[in-house]
Amino acid sequence: MRNEGLSAFWKGIPWAYCREGSYTAIRLGAYAPVRDAIGAGAPDAPAHMKFLAGALTGAVGSVAGNPFDVLKTLSQTNKSESLPLMSLVGKMYRDQGIGGFYRGVQVNIMRAITLNATKMGVYDISKGYVVDTTGWQRNSAKTAFCSSFLAGFFMTVTVSPFDRVRTALMNQPTDAKLYDGMTDCLVKTVRNEGILSLWKGFIPIWARFAPMATLQLLTIEFLYSSFGFKGI
């Protein structure tokens, strides 16, 4: 804040909006329809089918949101004078072509599969345990709150390594290539900083994931109910 001012905390926010409007809309909004379509809608449906539904919607959403993710990361890590939105897009396209907007897409897909499978699967399954333990209704806000908080913790455990690698890949300069893909980045990170570095910043990440997951899942439950769809 001393070097860049208070506004630095909101760097890249237009790209963050675009990312959430594509990636999050698909991975959350499509979960229940996809879950029901593959026969995992019943409370006693196999857990792996619920995880599969989350993985499928997460993968599709990550492909749609990857260009915005790259631009958001570059905007947030840029320490020089901030580039206008279209100038950043033009510079990326000029230096690396359309492929530049999809750098890190492999790790982003793996991350999204892991994140959404964990988030939606743990949330869906936790609701059953919360209902059995407390006697609350499955569609009550209390059940959704407790279940989403649990989902936020397990998301942090499973997703942190992917976040570490993804950030390193996307943060490469537009005119340079430091890593030859996800595996090379992972190996170099572990070799240079140790295996525990993949969970660096665990507490701040959990502090971000827990409230975010809670708000998102409460919102999607409200929207499902408002538009007459079956809840999670």
Image (tube, rainbow, N blue to C red):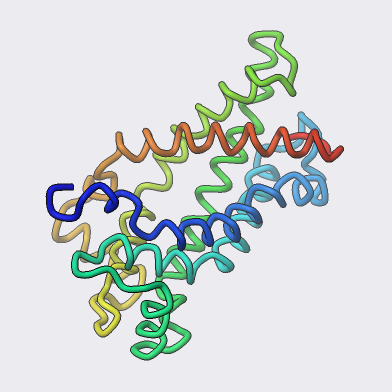
- Position of residue 8 in the picture relative to residue 104 (left or right): left
Q: Residue furthest top?
A: 134
* In the rendered image, the vertical position of residue 103 relative to residue 147, given as above or below: below
The quarter of the picture where the C terminus appears is top right
Residue sitting at 71 percent across and 34 percent down?
221
Q: Position of residue 82 (x, y in %)?
A: 27, 68
Residue sitting at 26 percent across and 42 percent down?
201
Residue sitting at 17 percent across and 60 percent down?
191
**Residue closest to the eye, 213 or 14:** 14
Q: Position of residue 9 (x, y in %)?
A: 30, 49
* In the rendered image, the vertical position of residue 218 relative to residue 103, given as above or below: above
Residue sitting at 72 percent across and 37 percent down?
46
- Position of residue 170 in the picture relative to residue 37 (left or right): left
- Position of residue 6 in the picture relative to residue 207 (left or right): left
Q: Position of residue 66 (x, y in %)?
A: 49, 67
Q: Residue furthest right?
A: 228
Q: Position of residue 118 (x, y in %)?
A: 54, 42
Q: Which image quadrant is residue 93 in?
A: bottom left
**Residue closest to the eye, 191 or 154:** 154
Q: Which image quadrant is residue 13 in?
A: bottom left
* In the rendered image, the vertical position of residue 118 relative to residue 131, given as above or below: below
Q: How many marks?
A: 0
- Position of residue 152 in the picture relative to residue 169 (left or right): right
